[in-house]
Image (tube, coloured by chain):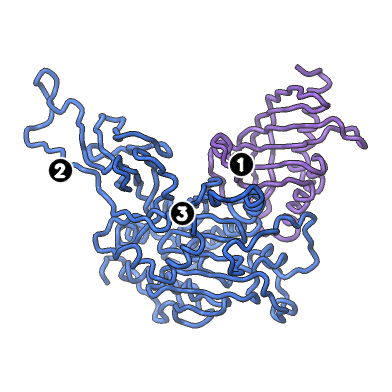
Chain colours: A purple, B blue
Amino acid sequence: MVTTETQLAVERLLARYVASLDEDRLEEWPDHFTEKCRYQIISSENHRQGLPIGVFFADSRDMLRDRVMALRQVNVYEPQGYRHLVSSTLVSDEGGGIVAAQSNYMVVRTMHDGTATLFSTGRYLDRITFQTGQTGEPLFLEKLVLYDGSRIDTLLAIPL
Amino acid sequence: MRNSLALTWPKEGLTRVPYALYGREDVYAEERASIFRGPSWSYLCLEVELPNPGDYRATFVGDIPVIVARDMDGSLNAFENRCAHRGALLCFKRGGHGREISCVYHNWTYDLRGNLIGVAFERGIDRKGGMPPDFKREDHALRRLRVENFAGLVFGTFSPDAPTLADYLGEAIAARIRRVLCKPVAVLGYSSQMLPNNWKIYVENNRDSYHASLLHTFFTTFRVNRLSQEGGIIVDDSGGHHVSYSKRATDKASREYDSAKLRASRDDYRLADPSLLDGRDEFGDGITLQILTVFPTFVLQQVQNSLAVRQVVPRGVGQTELFWTHLGFTDDDAAMRAIRLKQSNLVGPGGYISLEDGAVGGFIQRALPASGDESSIVTMGGADARSQDTRATETAVRGFWKAYRGMMGV
């Protein structure tokens, strides 16, 4: 069990995290992570089988910044946006100012022509630190995006 | 013309490809009959995915569902994933393990070679009902494929007329497969991607070295692959298979990249974490990129230290599923696994250099209504389909159509 304050702080972090993606403020997305961090998008089936490779992996905040730079400046894809719905967040205390959180997510992707599809559902498995110094806001040490199924429609550009 | 397709190939030959091929149902049906059931070899799975006797997996040849199994004697077999009785899928999961495979519908049971070994209530109940006296199980085996294993890649063909797999691949292609699959592999991950386009658009894209450094800006910006690097294209005699390779360390200053106004050519970006591109020359020949295709639907990929096989499965005229299987070697050390994990970011459905291929096929498919009876232009680097020491060419695309026309009779 964690305190209501901790639960709320985790949910607020998740809300700010998805807002940075959904509102096209991608440059703020890496700010929710610690400098050394771990972020991965991988199918829940690969994860269950202990297979290490998924769709995207980063072990530093700079790698996340590089993803944003590539999406903004380098890669080519049709204009599109996400809407994340995050729910059922369970938080547990790991001690040392670190909590583990697991949530369900759902992402609707809307293309520039108006086509909206259910793009991805799955779970977030997060480890979050409250020992963050400057802003006092909690940060992700680790965020594992376990998507259901194995299929991705067309391409995955924006992170989940 | 061997088949009944009403299709006239343009008089220019391999340098023209009719757009009708990407949108017509009758073409799609003919491909199933003449290519996927014809004298081609299709990738089924990796040998390492069937380690033990009794292991089996569901896979596809074209869009035809197939089971590939390791029999109790260790041999590899493949047969249609379709019950001989009422035509239901036998294996409706990724795979399984056992001495036999039963249909859930009426419990007809097959061994791992596809022989029918059990029919529920074959003699009826209390001597009533049951199969007629002339019913013979041996008349109802599942349709089998010939199966061969090359360097741990399991291929199958429906056709008794296909050459041996080694002859089908030819020496040059076989050597480049062995170059990568030189020791025991380990599967490091799976993913799949639904492409909104005809399957041929994707397999042409693999053979199209012209587009690589133009569409895939990441390639060029971070000098992972430029046409100004040493490299070339190998096209086998059939035309259907190819290898494109390059050496990243050999990039020389190129007026074409520097002065031309290429969207792809930007030098003002730097990776904040350049460890993404740190790798090893693990094959000892300086080749940092090798894309290899086998007609019709197989790809073996080395992008730096990211190794993968890709299986292309048609899902109707305008849809294709692309299955990615990421590989390493069983003797990788931890540092090598870390390199492969990072460099997997280059490929797959969200990869820095493969992401655009998910989109560009759909751009062609969506523009088909405008194409009428027109053809695309494939004249870069000449009119034939031979190996070349430049990648500013569409020779391997023409090669694909050479093999395709041969099998389709068009």
Q: Amino acid at mark 3?
A: Gln
Q: Give the answer, above or below, for where B317 lies relative to B69.
A: below
Residue A125: give x, y in percent of width and height.
Answer: 68, 32
Q: Is residue B311 left or right of residue A6?
A: left
Rendered-image quadrant of the N terminus of chain B: bottom left
Place of residue B167 in the rendered image (x, y in percent of width and height, measured from the top left): 33, 68
What secondary structure is marked by label 2?
A: helix
Are dots 3 and 2 on a single chain? yes
**Local secondary structure at mark 1:** strand
> Does label 3 or label 2 sit earlier along the sequence?
2
- Could you tell me if residue A112 is visible in this image? no
Which subunit holds the residue at mark 2? Answer: B
How far across and down, in percent of the image, does residue A102 sit?
Answer: 69, 28
What's under tag 1, amino acid-wise?
Ile
Q: In the rendered view, tell whether residue A160 sits above or below residue A91.
A: below
Q: Are marks 3 and 1 on the same chain?
A: no
- Which amino acid type corresponds to the residue marked 2 in the rendered image? Asp
Give the secondary structure at mark 3: strand
Report whether mark 1 lies on the same chain as mark 2.
no
Circle 3 is placed at which residue position?
A: B311
Q: Is residue B401 left or right of residue B388?
A: left
Q: Nearer the viewer, residue B10 or B241?
A: B241
Rounded to the nearest angstrom, the CA distance separating label 1 from label 2 is: 46 Å
Q: Which residue is mark 2?
A: B139
Query: Residue at the spot x=21%, y=38% of the render?
Result: B116
Q: Where is B45 relative to B15, above or below? A: above
| Residue A42: image tag | 1
